[in-house]
Image (cartoon, rainbow, N blue to C red):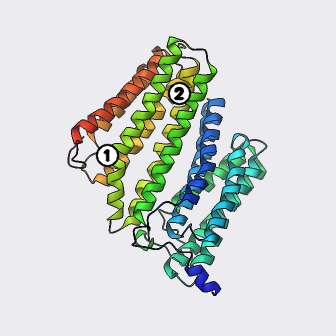
Amino acid sequence: MTGEHRRRGLLRPRGGHEAGRVTFVELFFDLVFVFAVTQLSHTLAAHPTVGGALETGMLFLAVWWVWIFTSWVTNWLDPERTPVRLLLLGLMFAGLILSSSLPSAFAGGALVFAAAYSVMQVGRCLFMLWALKGHAPGNHRNFQRITAWLSTSALLWIGGALLGGTGQFALWGAALVIEYLSPIAGFWTPGLGRSTTADWDVEGSHMAERCALFIIIALGESILVTGATFAEHARSLEALSAFAVAFVGSVALWWIYFDKGAEHATHRIASSADPGRLARIAYTYLHLPIVAGIIVGAVGDERMLAHPQDAANAASVAVIVGGPALSVLGITLFKWINYDRWAPPLSHLVGLALFALLAVVGGGLSVLTLGAAATAVLLLVALWETRALGSHTGTSRT
């Protein structure tokens, strides 16, 4: 078999029953990001300040971007092929290095983080250029553009790590702006032009399942935090109550995302005339606040379990109320895009209004009471949508 034929065999087949299937090696790859999510939540918990939140937020944006870009790549490549598997395993190794350096990324581990991140982003693009050459001219040109953008941002990641301090924050911020704007700009590159979402041959059901699985990863971290923190503290009525509140909150968030919206969104993108557009908006961008909110909420659960009777300060309100609110905001926008309604779901808008009210009055409550109130809002949104829609998904304004 020639090298050209081998490269052709690396592309994911389209149109068949197996085309959108998530493979075991992709799930294996995701294990690294279970660790990354844990590292992010612990980093935020250890630095509950505005500066700590900004740094953790920047690191989260990088972690999400390297994961979602890999999901786009495996949407085009067949992970059952040995070269693609080796690519994913190599990315997994680099991702483990990246994840382990997250707590020290703004200290002594900056260069390790930047190098691992840049190798993952640029190295994956170079593999795609090799795999697509001669077989998918449009996508090959697209990856020429992507490689140019990510190579530029890689210089900023490395430069920021070498500078440290304010220079690091500024250059890393610029790198993230470049990377997050690039899909919106169609990866426009001098001499190569720009691509459109219609050029991106997306297998919609695969993209939907990949992002849903990342939601499971984030919720899994929340469950782990709940169990681990509960195990470390003496049993009491307050501890048991906090444990129940944290668990029910995770269940409610799962319900809000998966009960109605996820399956409908899968059908929508799979049947869309322009799945690339939905993949970019609904999955690449709008899943960001959903996952970020779950991570922040896990920090809130840890606080509630560790100190249930403490008075809620500003940091406690931010994580206990802000985390779930951020997730519900992301889910609201996600459903609005996928249901093509004139307005977002009413149940979700009411939930966001109640979260805003809790943020105002929450400082006068105990941490446990505040957590119980936030969980009650999540339950209200979940039950309202389930009752309003019933089996008629997408037909009601909820």
Lateral position of residue 168 relative to residue 227, left or right: right
Q: Which of the 4 image quadrants contains residue 58?
A: top right
Q: Which amino acid does label 2 sit on?
A: Asp
Instruction: Indicate the position of residue 229 as horizontal and vertical percent values.
Output: 60, 25
Q: In which quarter of the image is the C terminus?
A: top left
Question: How far apart, in angstroms, are the residues tagged by discs 2 and 1?
Answer: 25 Å
Instruction: Indicate the position of residue 194 as horizontal and vertical percent values.
Output: 49, 73
Q: What element carries label 1?
A: helix
Residue extending furthest toward the bottom: 2
Residue occupying image coordinates x 69% and y 44%: 102
Q: How many residues crowd around disc 2 within 10 Å: few (fewer than 14), some, or many (20 or more)?
A: many
Looking at the image, which is closer to me, 28 or 146? 28
Q: How many residues crowd around disc 1 within 10 Å: few (fewer than 14), some, or many (20 or more)?
A: many
Looking at the image, which is closer to me, 230 or 218? 230
> Residue beneath label 1, please?
260
Q: What residue type is labelled 1?
A: Lys
Residue occupying image coordinates x 61% and y 49%: 31
Instruction: Indicate the position of residue 30 as horizontal and vertical percent values.
Output: 58, 52
Name the N-terminal-most of marks 2 and 1. 1
- Image height check: is 119 above or below 245? below
Q: In which quarter of the image is the N terminus?
A: bottom right
> Residue beneath label 2, please?
301
- Image height check: is 196 above or below 158? below
Residue occupying image coordinates x 39% and y 60%: 278
